[in-house]
Structures are given as structure tokens and as C-alpha cells.
Amino acid sequence: TVITQKGEYLIGTGKKDFDIREIGHMEGISDIHIVSDDYKLVSKKWKVKPTIIDLGDGVVIEEGGFQIMAGPCSIESEDQIRKVIGHLKENGISIMRGGVYKPRSSPYSFRGLGIEGLQLWYQLAKEAGIKIITEVMQVSQIAEMYPYTDIYQVGARNTQNFNLLDELGKVDKPVMIKRGISGTIDELLSSAEYVFSGGNERLLLCERGIRTYESATRNTMDLNAIAVLKEKTHLPVISDPSHGIGIRDFVEPIALASIMAGADGVIFETHEKPEEAYSDGQQTLNFEESTKMINRMRKTFELRESF
Amino acid sequence: TVITQKGEYLIGTGKKDFDIREIGHMEGISDIHIVSDDYKLVSKKWKVKPTIIDLGDGVVIEEGGFQIMAGPCSIESEDQIRKVIGHLKENGISIMRGGVYKPRSSPYSFRGLGIEGLQLWYQLAKEAGIKIITEVMQVSQIAEMYPYTDIYQVGARNTQNFNLLDELGKVDKPVMIKRGISGTIDELLSSAEYVFSGGNERLLLCERGIRTYESATRNTMDLNAIAVLKEKTHLPVISDPSHGIGIRDFVEPIALASIMAGADGVIFETHEKPEEAYSDGQQTLNFEESTKMINRMRKTFELRESF
Amino acid sequence: TVITQKGEYLIGTGKKDFDIREIGHMEGISDIHIVSDDYKLVSKKWKVKPTIIDLGDGVVIEEGGFQIMAGPCSIESEDQIRKVIGHLKENGISIMRGGVYKPRSSPYSFRGLGIEGLQLWYQLAKEAGIKIITEVMQVSQIAEMYPYTDIYQVGARNTQNFNLLDELGKVDKPVMIKRGISGTIDELLSSAEYVFSGGNERLLLCERGIRTYESATRNTMDLNAIAVLKEKTHLPVISDPSHGIGIRDFVEPIALASIMAGADGVIFETHEKPEEAYSDGQQTLNFEESTKMINRMRKTFELRESF
Amino acid sequence: TVITQKGEYLIGTGKKDFDIREIGHMEGISDIHIVSDDYKLVSKKWKVKPTIIDLGDGVVIEEGGFQIMAGPCSIESEDQIRKVIGHLKENGISIMRGGVYKPRSSPYSFRGLGIEGLQLWYQLAKEAGIKIITEVMQVSQIAEMYPYTDIYQVGARNTQNFNLLDELGKVDKPVMIKRGISGTIDELLSSAEYVFSGGNERLLLCERGIRTYESATRNTMDLNAIAVLKEKTHLPVISDPSHGIGIRDFVEPIALASIMAGADGVIFETHEKPEEAYSDGQQTLNFEESTKMINRMRKTFELRESF
């Protein structure tokens, strides 16, 4: 039995065929569905209505809608935060991204400002009416970060960190799960199933490019996955073109393309001076590029809506 | 020295540094460029003006423009051809795709109607004012097909069939080269360089999905490649969403996405009754779906143009 | 400064060129090396002598030697443990593998017996003079498992779980890190660098197959990686043919091949009745197959040694 | 009906179930098999006896045996040929590899000496009692090369050049088909089926590494494929470690590993002075390295035979 913050679900799994009438007349059962996929609760097969994630203050992410999240790769300083917030306010963006715990391949790289950085950032964002999304890397950070975050992000290296997913299932704040660096679509949905079956229904999925043999781009953005996910799940699907292609000049076309592929939102990296950013500068837009892209994304979404 | 149907080029390659002033003052030299990539003539580094391919009768494919090519996977019968032509005329499409030589993994699969099918098809298309594009699989077919085709297509399995590319360099009809099943962007450009350096400048490139570990879709459409190719080459880049995702329901979102990524055209599969098609039925649109998608593609291109 | 259980290292990183004579004459400096790779301490560039990991009681894993580790995918019951131990003793194997915490794609799959299973297993193994290796999935398990394990294993999904790696750097028991499902060789070495720079030099690396487009086998065993790792690092490299190919009949040829490629050890799955195993039965050898393979592996290692 | 140089086969394909008794009593039918794979004639399901390819003069390649083929990437000059032949004779090698038609990504690279080079080489090899294997790139070369070759090689870029395969089915000389750069095991077998069903049963398959995301090596040698092919087909399977890893120092361990994985032969690149070779020097062994590896390969095969 799964009890989430929104309802109660009884999941039955097994290899035997099953007569659903046997439990259908039992008291308290309102509906029964057979879902043949490995994932059950995140499937569109039983829940046709789109998932709506309400962050409060009128900020909503929903399957079928469109939200933009933007900000630097790493949170660096008060000055940097203030400048990004100013840029977001000017463009009517309500959700800021940024990292304070940075997963880095090498132990000698910059690993982020940590909890102090998060506290400062959250404070400034709250004053400005901006929600924040930031990566959580391990179980012990969940409680620590709780007062200072609006959406927990699970990074591509942690998509199958099942203990982390289990624990995020117990939290009453939304979670965005990025697809693994070489994760399949089904693995992403199964990872979401961990959190959902743990009790937390407020989930977002994020396509951020996969690893292939092509080395001209940092990753290979898989827009097929966005189209497929839109059919398989009732959860909102977010596109991350910054990591998906990894080269500044091409972030915009991939962002616009992902909207046409069906994305319910776009998350991207912006910084006042990308060339001075602590990390990911090569794929980060400056504010001018960011503003131009935001306007074009909105027009593209409008067109998609008109279809 | 490369002499094409449009001009003369002198290509110098080598590992030594080179003082371009040495040849700059020689008679007959109008311009000199240094191109550090493996491919030279297809690079945007020397040719900033987009390539325009004029098929006659007002049908033009050009870098920066937008053309649609549609038709069945395989040419099957006169009746089938007439119905597709009717559908194209209704929707204002001027280029029909179709295969008469089919590369098939198994020797026991349907391999196409061959030259008789092509002759019939070309005749019917010409009467209707429709241009045709069809796959050439080997050198001996080039001359055979010459009177009956408007654009030669080089399939994904032949992207590095260098003898075929060499011979196509000697022909005065346009050639569309599909990216290899696991071809890199640079390999595609080098294959185009074969044809161009052979003398034929009228070239199109086509992204049709690459092979990855993801098995939920037939291929992984690489829209990053379209964005990157648009910067690297002056040749038009065409998107093939039918093969790129391989599942009927998702062809439209990927087609629209590829326009936003920068495609100069879309080629897709349509058939009166996809479920009865000899091949690729699972990714082929019926006429109703096709009409809807054509309209949406045009609106998407209009929006892109407005940016 | 890195202080491990074996020595003290001063690591300097940066982009500037550097005159090593400046620090060479300082007191307490015994040796200086320049390592241009992202990983430093695990590189063979400074440490030519092979790493030797002494597990006590004469059980040693060393670069250039050969050790076998065998056992079931999951620890299931006392009876199962006793039977495997009996099989290992008969074949002179000193290290038993087995999982009590199982990372599973779906939350509804069997997740292992947990700490009680580990306690029982360790007790039985100790009585028999057998060392054990088992997977640790999260930071909180490190201390919990400490009294009951001889080698911590980091699974393919946790190769870039950097917090876990950081914490394992503080432990005085050996750690075997598996290559990520799509991890590069350099990423594996950088993950090892996390543990080493955290203070724990007793490290093993494990090739267990990577994810490719080929679906005839579970993974694609990358024996190239074993050959390359042997040149890049002084750490022992272990081969896992069970996961590497994932099909029982082919485990032996891949095990023997990996010895010829240079592996310092092989870890594989065996069970009295593979068809009844809780997990991974399709790639698990029965005891008869296991015995045959153990003998052949030893002869293959002897041959390699004679070269 | 397929009539090969060795026998007659009636292949029936289709989706309907079929009662084999209906044709079993017909005259002239000696045996009936049901093969559910896409490939039929190359399957081990009907032919249990290994295929033996007799090149004459006592040179035999057979499934279950072991043959070595060695030589330079490109044939360069009479002097080079003589030196390699001398090296092969000293080591008791009867088959020499070399390219006179070179598939090159760039049209500006060295493309081989062509038919004159082949004639010279064949003459010298014949005098020395050495058989030769060389790549055929297009249909028109088949007849041209016929008098001067012992084994036709189909390169990785032509594995799915179906016209070439069709024509090679009509020739009475052996053909070795290399796996495609990203070809699946099943595709390789289906390509062999083209040649076999065209009438030529004398076929070899060759694993030469596949394209993956790993960039530390030129390709990823897939030894799993060798183990799997040995079960699926009665055709001999050859390993090409030179292309499989692409780095000189690692050719030997991969060669030895591939023998343990089940290879019926090894083909590798050797040259008197690899650093001066026209192509592939970085993966070519000098004669000293070659001699050492040949001896070790033979000992490794002996050990495998003893199992």
C-alpha cells in the first residue's frame, strides 16, 4: 500500500493473472487499473488528468503548460545572485536554478558553496518572489536543505541513487529527476516510481541529453524522449537544452525545438558574464541572449498551443 | 584542382604552414581561404552565401528556406503513386519521395520494384509537375536512373560508400546524403566533400536519427546535429523525422522540433493506408495526419522566419 | 594535502606552469611528480610499484597477481550461504561475493536481506576463513556494515556518487569501484581519485561491461578498458564477466579472455541452483560450471605469467 | 531456391505456421530445418558441422581451428611487400593482409595503389607460397581483382552494401565480412546470409570493434560478439585486434583475449617501420612485436584446445 500526500494506492505486482473483480467490490476501492509497465503510479494508463505542481504564489508547473527556470550553473556570490534575480524579474521568470552542491568528476574541482550559499540565495530569492530549484546529492542534505528550497533536483549521476529517491518520497516538496547520463526512458520512469511510491506525487522529469559516440556536442539531446514521455506519463517533462547540447550558440534552437517536441518547461543556464562563471560557462547564455530566447520560447509555446 | 559544374577550386592540403600571399597574386586566383577542417569545399568558412538548389519549374531547395518532400517508403503500384501524387498536389507539395531500390538487412525482404517502377513513377510525377527523390544504391544504377530522377538519395548505409560518392560527383543532378547510422557530423561533411570535390556542388544533407542504446524509439533523432550543421556548412540540411523516431504518433512533434532546430526542409513518409504499406508502415502517416502536419510545419517555419 | 593511512601527499593543481625545483628542496619532501591527467594519486605516472591489498590471513589482491571472488548475486538464506561457502572451500577460493543491499530499477523488486543478512553471512564466512565483498549503496550504510565486511563494493550506478566516495575515503577497509554503466575509463579513475584523496589507498577497479546499442548481450564487456587501465594505474583491475555479458553460457570465455587482457582478478556469480536464484539467475553459473571455469582461469593465468 | 557451389537449398519464409511433413516426403529433399532467425543458411541451427575453407596448398581456415593473417594496412611498394613476406615466412604465417583500395573518410587522403599494386603483390606472394586477403570496395572491382586475390574482404563501411554482397555471392572465392562500425551481431549474420544465399558458402566473419562513447581507444573491441557468434553460426570468426583497440601497445593483450573468447583466427597489422606506414601506423606492430605476439597466440590457442 502506498500512501502519498494526495491519496492512497494499493499496488499489486506479480506474474499471475488476476481477476480485478475480486477486489473491485471491496470497500474503499474507488478505481482499479492494470498497468503492464514496470512503473505503475507514474503511468498515464491510469491517470489521464495531467499532474499540476503548485509552488505557491501563483507559480505552477503542469503537464501541458509551460514554465521557464533559469539561472547560473553554480551559485557564486551575493552580487551574482542579485544580478540574476534582476534579470529574471525583468523577464517575468518565477523560478531560478543554481547549484550549491556540485557533482564534479574530479575531486579537485570547485564543489559549490554548500548550505551557507543556499541560505543566502533562498533569502534573496524569497524577498524577490522567486522560487528556487537546486540539486540535492545525498540523503543527509534533504533535511538540511528543506527550509531553503522549493524544488529538489536529482542530477543525472543520481537518477539511480535509489536511497536518495526513497528518502525524497517522504518529503512534501516537489522533486525534478534528470534522466541518467545513459539512462533509458523506462529507467527514468522507474526512478520516478520510487519517489511516487514513497509518498511524494509532486514530480517533474527532465531530459538533459544522453551520452553517445558523437563528440561534436557535449551530449546528444534526445527530443524523441520528450515526445515519448509525454505519452507515457502524466508528469510534467522539462527540457534542459544547456546540458543537452552544451554549446552556447546552439542552446536557443534546441530550446525552441524541445517546446515543439512537447516539453512542459525549459531549464537553462544564464549568467551576467558566462566567460567568468565558475562552471559550465561554455553553455551559459548572457542576459541579452537569455532575454531573446525567453521571448522566442514564449512565442513558440503559443504556436504549439494554437495547434 | 577541382572543377565543378559551377566553378574551379584549387585545394591544397598538407601539414606544413603556408604563406597564402605566395599564391595570392597569381593570375586567375580570385579568393583564398584557410579551412582547418578535414572537409574544405562544403565548409561555411569560405562560402558564406547559402547554397541554392534549383530543380526547375520554380522548385528550389535552399539553405535558410523550407521545402517539404513526402511519399511512401516503397513505390508499390500505379494506383499507390497516383493517390500519393493527388495528396501532394492538394497540399501544394512539389517533391515526392519513394524507394524503388530498397536496402534491406535480410536478403529475403522486399527489395523494391526497380527501374520499371522508377520509370512509371517518374512519368506520372512529371505529368503532375512533381519532382522526385529516390535512393541510388550502387554505381551502375546512377546512369540507369539518370533519365528518371530529380534528386539522387544516398542512404544511411551508403554514407561511406566512397565509390558511389565519387561517381555522384560526376553527375549534374542534385544529391541528398543521409547521415550514417552511427556516422558523426564530421563524417557526413567529409562524405559531402567527396561529391563536391568530384565536381557536383548541388548537395543536401539529411539527419535521420542515429543508433544509441535507447530502444524505445527506432533511432535517436539528433537535432543537435541540425543546429551544428547549420553553422558548419553552406549546404541545405533536411530532417527525416519518420526514420528519426520511427513511430507514427511522434513523427509530427519531431518534424516541428527539427524546424525550430534549423532544418531547411523535412522529408517524411506518407501512404494512403500505412497499415498496408510494403515497408515502414509503423512510421508512415496517413493522408489526414500528413495534411495536418504539413500545415503545422508551415506555421512553424513562418514563426522561425519571424525571429 | 592528502593524508592517507599509508602516507602524506601534497597535491597541487592549477593551470599555471610550475617550477618543481621551488618545492623540491623543502624539508620533508621526498619525491615530486607531474601528472597531467585529471586523476593524480591513482596514476602509474608517479607510482610504478603495484598496489598490494592485504586482506589478512594470507589473502592478497595485487596488481599483477590473480584473485578469484565468487558467490551469488543476492544473499538469500543460511542454507544458500553454507552451500556456496562449501563450494568455494572445495575450489580454494578465499573471497565470497554477495549482495544484501540490491540496487533495483523498480521499487517493487527484491531489495536484499539488509544488515541482518550481512551479519549472518559474515559470521558464517569468518568461521570458514572466507573474506567477503559486498555492495554499499549509501553513506549511512558504511558504518553499519563496517564490522561485517572485508571489501566494500561501489556498484555501477554509484560510480559517480561522490558523497559516497568521499566517505569511503575515510574508512580503513578496501573498496572496489565498478565502472559506471556508461562511464569512461577516465571517469572511473577520477572516482578512484576521490577515495584515494580522501585517505584510503586500498582500492580495486572493476570492469563490468558498458551500455551500447548491441542488445544480443546484457552489456558490452570492454576488455580494451582492462588493457588500458593496466597501463594508466597502479591499482588492481578486476573483471566481472557475469555482468559483462550477462548470459551464462558465455561467462567462461569472457572470463578467460579478460585474464589475457590483463585482469588481476575475476569476480563472478555462482549459485547451487541458478534457475531458483532471487536475481541474475540467467548469468549465474552452477557449481559444476563454476569449478570447471575456476580451473581454466588458473591455467590461463599461469600461461599469461609465463609470457 | 538457393544453389551454391556446394549444394542446393530451398528457403521458405513467411509468417504462417507450416507443417514440415508436407514437404518432407517430396523427392530430392534430404533434410528440413526450421530457423526462426532472420538469417537461415548461416545459422548453426541446421548445420552443426563447422565450415572449412580450403585456400589450397594446405592453407585452411575452419571453425574451431586457428589461423593468423598479418600484413600492413596499405600495400606501399615492392620493397615493403618483400619485407613483410620475409617476416611471415620466418614465422610460418601463410596469409598476408594488405589494402590496395582504401576507404578513407576524407577524399584528400591516400586511397591505395589500386590494381597495379595488387598485381605486383599477388605475384610476389604467390612466388613465396603466401595467400592474400584484401578489401574489395565496389562491384566493378570484383572481376578486376579476381585473378589476383585469394580472399575478398568486405570492410566495416560496406557490411551493408547489399549490391556488393549480392555480387560476391556469385564468386567462387572466399569472402571475409567485417562487422559494421555500429553493426549488430544479427546484422552481420544477415549480411553473410546475402552472400551465402547468392551462392557462395565460403564465408568468414570478422569482429573489429564497434563505435561507442569511449574515446580512450579507437573502437571498443566487442569480444562478447565473438563468443555469441560462435554459438549462432557455423562460419569461422576472425578477430581484428588492430582496429579493435587501435593502439599498438594493446594489440597483443586483445589478440590473446580474443582467442580465449573463441576466435578461429586473428588478423593484425604489421610493418617493418610502423612509424613510416602510409596509414594506421599507430596500431601497427613492428616485426619484433609481431613475432612475439604470434608465439603467444599459438600458445594461447594450444591452451584453449586443451580445455
Image (cartoon, coloured by chain):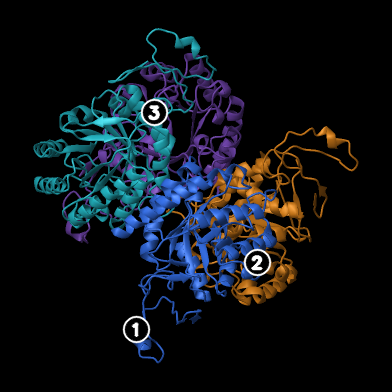
Chain colours: A blue, B cyan, C orange, D purple
Q: Nearer the viewer, mark 3 or mark 2?
A: 3
Residue at (40% x, 27% y) in the render: D134
Element marked by disc 2: helix
Q: Nearer the viewer, mark 1 or mark 2?
A: 2
> Residue A42 location in percent, x, y?
43, 70
Element marked by disc 3: loop
Foreground of the two, B299 or A9? B299
**Which amino acid is tagged 3?**
Val
Residue at (32% x, 35% y) in the render: B63
Q: Chain of mark 3?
A: B
Q: Are marks 1 and 2 in contact (CB under 8 Å)?
A: no
Residue under circle 3?
B48
Query: Could you say which disc has been placed on residue A19 in the image?
Result: 1
> Residue C188 location in percent, x, y?
62, 50
Q: Earlier in the sequence, mark 1 or mark 2?
A: 1
**Which amino acid is tagged 2?**
Gln
Residue under circle 2?
A141
Query: Could you say which disc has been placed on residue B88 in the image?
Result: none
Quadrant of the image occupied by residue B33: top left
